[in-house]
Amino acid sequence: MRLSKGNAARSVEVRGMKLSVIIPCFNEVEQIGRVVSAVEAVEIEKEIIIVDDGSTDGTTEVVEKYGQDKQVIAHTSKSNFGKGAAIRTGLEYVTGDIVVIQDADLEYDPSQIPALVAPIIEGKADVVYGSRFKGSIRGMKLASRIANRLLVWTANLLYRAGITDEATCYKAFRTDVLRDLGLKCVRFEFCPEVTAKVSKRGIKIVEVPIDYVGRTTLQGKKIKLRDAFEAIWTLIKYRFVD
């Protein structure tokens, strides 16, 4: 693993709190520049932590340049481990009080980050999910809708989570809460693991409406149907183990 840093990444106060945005990425050479620019354009002072998860398409070189030239922490891995592992790696570099996960595919618009973190800044929540089903959805396949509904049903049945969107990428946490969960995720099981562990600790998940524009497999979407089954199994597993 290699770590490259430019100037020290800025973490300045947002109403007395610091915001850290973790961007896990894998083979997103066409999108990584756009997503970083979009996050930088958000009118909240923040630090950006990019974790390249063993890309082979040129993404690694782009990420390393960000680490050299901008106020960004850039971590590159030699092997592809998975989104969950990339998030756990990114968490090691976080210095802010609030953590937001931002996928590199721009299915989620970074301009929505202020609304996502507002309940935490205002002291109304420790964990916030951006709900696509309370906002608007474009480009989601029927199979994905069914899988999402099944995940919501399972989370609410097992944990009484009271949520409408379990698998949303847009999740925000108080950093101390996220670090206390002892995450073990490697691939896409990050979402069900945090849902399970947060709920078991009695922490209420607050939802805010967000807009979502899905992309196709040909456009680079990586999550598969088997990941939905893994997510369901993860929710079941953590109901009985820590």
Image: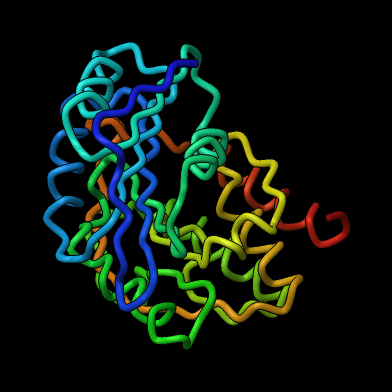
Whether 148 is drawn above or below 215: the answer is: below
Q: Quadrant of the C terminus?
A: bottom right
Residue 126 versus residue 186: which sits nearer the camera?
126
Using the rendered view, name the quadrant where residue 140 is placed.
Answer: bottom left
Q: Position of residue 217 (x, y in %)?
A: 31, 33
User: Could you tell me which residue is drawn at 43 percent across and 58 percent down?
Assistant: 96
Using the rendered view, name the quadrant where residue 199 is placed.
Answer: bottom right
Whether 98 is drawn above or below 215: the answer is: below
User: Could you tell me which residue is drawn at 47 percent across and 41 percent down?
Assistant: 93
Whether 46 is drawn above or below 162: the answer is: above
238 horizontally vs 154: left or right? right
Residue 119 versus residue 185: which sits nearer the camera?
119
Q: Is residue 158 visible?
A: no
Residue 25 versus residue 76: which sits nearer the camera?
76
User: Could you tell me which residue is drawn at 88 percent across and 59 percent down?
Assistant: 240
User: Could you tell me which residue is drawn at 47 percent across and 68 percent down?
Assistant: 165
140 horizontally vs 176: left or right? left
Identity of the residue furthest to the front in this view = 8
Using the rendered view, name the quadrant where residue 41 is placed.
Answer: bottom left
Whether 181 is drawn above or below 80: the answer is: below
